[in-house]
Image (cartoon, grey):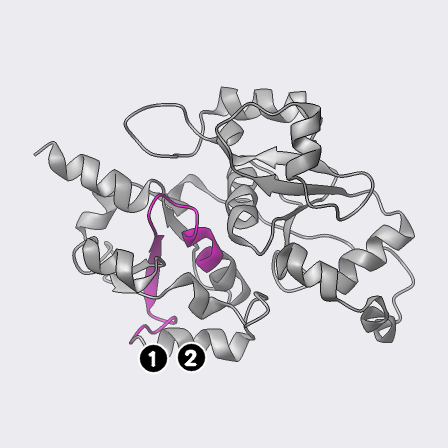
């Protein structure tokens, strides 16, 4: 495991042990799903898995786009789907995009034991179960996580300051693809596409490669606090996972991101 990432061989090992974990396929659709619909949209990783629709854990307030939900809405979702704080949850989708947002949302609401399948379902289909045998682990591994504090979810007021009270530098990193970035972006932001954090097989790059991603963009992780943005706050969660792995001071997400910025600035 690296931070909140769990490899396909490691997950296979846990499932073989019949470890007490929840595996959840993360999707995103605004259409109500029946049981048949759930099964149709769900990539089958194991026999006993759940489906998490990001739209069900997203604020319904308009015109703000896809913000984190209110506590009451999230609590209702958790209760209806029988998630609990003690049982580790492994989120996955085809690659990592939706799973990263689900991971961040659950972590924001106090779930410590939440993880993302590194490389997603596509990696799971192609992994070799024997890869993990070399680790020779006999007992079920202990899961360790951390809770996101409210200070790690930024709103527009925080973006107006380039330095915090302690004089430390801030960088606004936009994880959208370059075409979207060029059409409009938060002033002063740096474009580091989400794909820059990933290998060809959609697994997270090595620690050294991740550091080089920031170095080549002129960001000193020892001095700079980063606010992660994208279109609405989904792809930016991939960057927060990378920064957790690199043990940066904080992994800050601008919830609503570019869509929220546009709305706020239109009001003026």
Alpha-carbon neighbours of circle 2 within 10 Å: few (<14), some, or many (≥20)? few
Q: Is residue 209 left or right of residue 127?
A: left
Please tell me in which quadrant of the rendered image residue 78 appears.
Answer: top right
Q: Is residue 223 magenta?
A: yes
- Mark 2: secondary structure: helix
Quarter of the rendering occupied by the N terminus: bottom right
Q: Is residue 24 left or right of residue 240?
A: right
Residue tagged by mark 1?
216
Please tell me in which quadrant of the rendered image residue 87 appears.
Answer: top right
How many numbered discs, if any? 2
Q: Position of residue 162 (x, y in %)?
A: 19, 58
Q: Position of residue 53 (x, y in %)?
A: 56, 33
How far is mark 1 from mark 2, CA to CA? Answer: 6 Å
Residue tagged by mark 2?
212
Q: Could one spot residue 166 in this view of the protein?
A: no
Q: Could one spot residue 102 in this view of the protein?
A: yes
Q: Position of residue 105 (x, y in %)?
A: 51, 39
């Amino acid at each position: 495991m690296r931070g909140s990432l769990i490899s396909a061989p490691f997950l296979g090992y846990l499932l073989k042990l019949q470890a007490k974990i929840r595996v959840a396929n993360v999707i995103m659709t605004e259409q109500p799903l029946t049981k048949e619909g759930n099964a149709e949209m769900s990539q089958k990783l194991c026999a006993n898995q759940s489906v998490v629709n990001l739209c069900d854990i997203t604020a319904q307030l308009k015109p703000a786009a896809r913000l984190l939900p209110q506590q009451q809405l999230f609590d209702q979702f958790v209760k209806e789907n029988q998630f609990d704080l003690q049982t580790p949850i492994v989120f996955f989708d085809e690659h990592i995009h939706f799973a990263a947002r689900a991971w961040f949302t659950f972590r924001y609401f106090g779930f410590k034991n939440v993880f993302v399948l590194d490389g997603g379902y596509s990696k799971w289909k192609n992994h070799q179960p024997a890869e993990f045998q070399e680790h020779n682990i006999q007992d079920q591994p202990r899961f360790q996580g951390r809770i996101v504090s409210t200070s790690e979810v930024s709103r527009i007021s925080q973006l107006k300051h380039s330095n915090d009270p302690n004089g430390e530098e801030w960088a606004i990193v936009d994880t959208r693809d370059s075409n979207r970035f060029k059409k409009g972006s938060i002033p002063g932001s740096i474009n580091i596409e989400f794909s820059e954090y990933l290998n060809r097989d959609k697994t997270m790059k090595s620690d050294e490669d991740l550091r080089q991603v920031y170095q080549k963009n002129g960001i000193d992780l020892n001095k700079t606090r980063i606010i992660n943005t994208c279109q609405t706050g989904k792809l930016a969660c991939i960057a927060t996972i990378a920064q957790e792995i690199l043990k940066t001071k904080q992994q800050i997400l601008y919830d609503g991101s570019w869509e929220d910025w546009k709305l706020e600035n239109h009001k003026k």
